[in-house]
Amino acid sequence: MEAALKEKLKKVVELVNNDMVDPDIDIEYCIPEVETTADSCDTSGDPYLLVSYAEDKYVKRKIRLSKSNLQKSAEDIANLVTFYIEQFKEEIDSVNMG
């Protein structure tokens, strides 16, 4: 992985961690050479985040960082990831609340 992309992804991880302080959401990172917190990361494809709902570990969503997304700024990528996580949480809440 090139150095500029590596630095951008480190910044994305930092921004997402700062924005997504939520006890109901667990975030695992599968970004080789930057942040790998999941036990079993598939490093053959695009880097991704695995988001799970704390109350139900079986409810998960994979957020891929595609090549087109990686061309954006770190702030734009972090905003996109944060949006996807918020959307995921709203979907889970709507199912749980009825």
Image (spheres, rainbow, N blue to C red):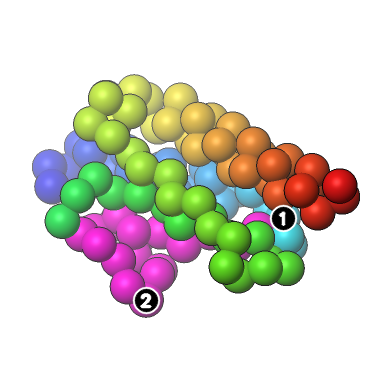
Q: Position of residue 50 (x, y in %)?
A: 46, 56
Dot 2 lies on which element?
Answer: loop
- Is 43 placed left or right of 54 in the picture? left
The amino acid type of the residue labelled 1 equals Asp
User: Where residue 39 is drawn, which disc sits there?
Assistant: 2
Residue 19 visible within the image? no
Which mark identifies residue 86?
Answer: none
Return the disc, 1 or 2, that comes first in the chain's sequence. 1
**In this rendering, would 75 be left or right of 56?**
left
| Dot in front, 1 or 2 | 2
Kind of residue sitting beneath label 2: Asp
Residue 63: which quarter of the image?
Answer: top left
- At label 1, counting other C-alpha atoms closer than 10 Å, the crowd grade (few under 14, some 14-19, many 20 or more) is few
Q: Nearer the viewer, residue 15 or 38?
A: 38
Residue 78 spot, x, y in % from top left: 49, 35
Marks 1,2: beta carbons within 8 A: no
Tell me the CA gap for discs 1 and 2: 21 Å
Relative horizontal placement of residue 72, taking residue 83 as reference (left or right) = left
Highlighted magenta segment, given as a residue range: 25-43
Please give the name of the residue rendered at 50% of the width and 30% of the height, measured from the top-left corner: 80
Task: Tell me the residue at 28%/43% (across/down).
Answer: 7
Say how many tags the image has. 2
Q: Which residue is mark 1?
A: 22
Dividing the picture into quadrants, the one containing residue 70 is: top left
